[in-house]
Amino acid sequence: MTPSAVESPAGLIITGCTVLTHDDQERIGFTENAAVVVRDGVVEEVTTAEAVAGRAADEWIDGRGQIALPGLINCHTHAPMVSLRGLAEDLPTEEWFNDVIWPVESNLTERDVELGARLACAEMIRAGVTCFADHYFSMDTVAAVVAECGMRALLGEAYFSSQGVRGRERSLEFALRHRGAAGGRITTALAPHAPYTVDDADLTATAALAREHGLPVHLHAAENRDQTEASLARHGVTPIGVLSRTGILDTDVLIAHGTGIIEDDLPLLERAEGRTAVATAPRGYLKFAWPGTTPVRALRDIGIPVGLATDGAASNNSLDVWETMALISLIQKSAEGDPRWLTSRQALHHASLQSARAVGLGGSAGSIAPGRRADLVLVDLTGPHTQPVHDLAATLVHSARAADVRTTVVDGRTLMRDRELLTIDVAEVVEELGERLPALVDRSHGRRIQEYGA
């Protein structure tokens, strides 16, 4: 430690906790009675509780009896859609879009988006999510909410080809305007909606813009098997094939869902020239009764990281990445017919380093280690539903809940401490949102922002 570091107080010291660690082979481990020292938003040191005794810090947190984890990352969501939570239930995908969601979304104002984003960020902070990848409309408003509440986010302004060239231009303008905003906590992406709503010409142009400006692409593709079969029938290639022939796979791309990825797609993904990742949100697949799930094992075998996601709360009903972490383990065991796959430690790896890589933060987030951004959470495992602890990884994945998160820190700033939100007034948001809901959910006008047809 340098003399200057000794003389000046740390920004934050968390002491007495058990820290989730990764070794040089990225294997999950736990260090007990540890301390985390944070300076200027970065983890400076992971050491013992004894080693920090007597040190000065602007903020101390007693972490005894708690587990320090890398902050969870929601790798694909539509945060403002919390306003539509529970509005379109027990419907097939086509009816869900065409009869409810897209008609309602035609009513959205910037204020609706802002209130939804505030409520979503509050929900995520309370659940230990420190970063999210958002794909929606009026994203200048979402960026302002992220900057104010202190979270980290990868943001993209969504567009359809039905909007004409202006939709694509707005997506680019947003990405360039906000890249690196909020002290670097905001990164941006180009955000075409999906191959079934964005034509080949727009996808090709998007790929060219991504390469020209050094931007990633975040989109839905091969969401389900029906989309894959429809694409084969209509275009002679799968949705992943469309991404390949339009050059999207030659960019850094985050693919949402991918339950329709088939064996023929794997060589295309493996040969992709850019950084390719997939975000999986299994709760929604169960609700829509899709016949498959994201082929995590096959993607792992070709080196494609799979990050954890919730999708929007209109389809998931929550933004709970803890639930996603448990579901990915359980559903993958069932899908593969192998109880040895996917283990609790593997699920934690998807929730940490793989999710960080998926959103382009593989070098700065996803682990609690010197030089990494100080995005971390403290989890209390003293509740009866988490005791006794025989296997800490299993307890975290299969027994712990979002409500067990006590403290959430992003970039060294405490956004929630002892379950108290410090940056968002939830009651104020809920009151105004409730007043606006009748106008928001009205469908009597007969409009919709887009037609769904895979």
Image (tube, rainbow, N blue to C red):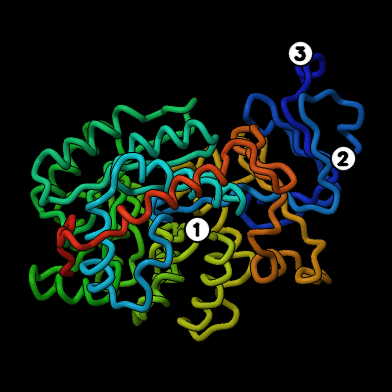
**Dot 2, how many residues are within 10 Å of its Cα: few (below 14), some (14-19), or many (20+)?**
some
* Lateral position of residue 45 relative to residue 15, left or right: left
Instruction: State the SS at label 2.
Output: loop
- Label whose residue precedes the other's in the sequence (2 or 3): 3
Residue drawn at point x = 78 percent, y = 38 percent:
14
- Judged from the image, the secondary structure of the residue bearing numbered disc 1 is loop
Q: Which residue is mark 3?
A: 4
**Compared to 296, does 422 lie above or below?**
above
Q: Are marks 3 and 1 in contact (CB under 8 Å)?
A: no
- Image location of residue 335, percent across then percent down: 45, 81
The residue drawn where x is 33% and y is 34% is 140
Q: Quadrant of the N terminus?
A: top right
> Split into 4 quadrants, where in the image is the C terminus?
bottom left
Disc 2 marks which amino acid? Ala
- Residue 357, above or below 197: above
- Which label's residue is closer to the chain start, 3 or 1? 3
Residue 106: x, y in percent?
22, 53
- Between discs 2 and 1, the one toward the N terminus: 2
Task: Judge the density around disc 3: few (<14), some (14-19), many (≥20) Cα neighbours within 10 Å.
Answer: few
Residue 341 point in image, percent of width and height: 56, 76
Task: Please tell me in which quadrant of the rendered image residue 199 appears.
Answer: bottom left
Residue 259 in which image quadrant: bottom left
Label placed on residue 390: none
Q: Is residue 108 above or below residue 197?
A: above
Q: CA distance from mark 2 to mark 3?
A: 21 Å
The residue carrying mark 1 is 319
Q: Does residue 72 show up?
A: yes
* Amino acid type, callout 1: Leu
In this rendering, would 379 be left or right of 437? right
Q: CA distance from mark 2 to mark 1?
A: 33 Å
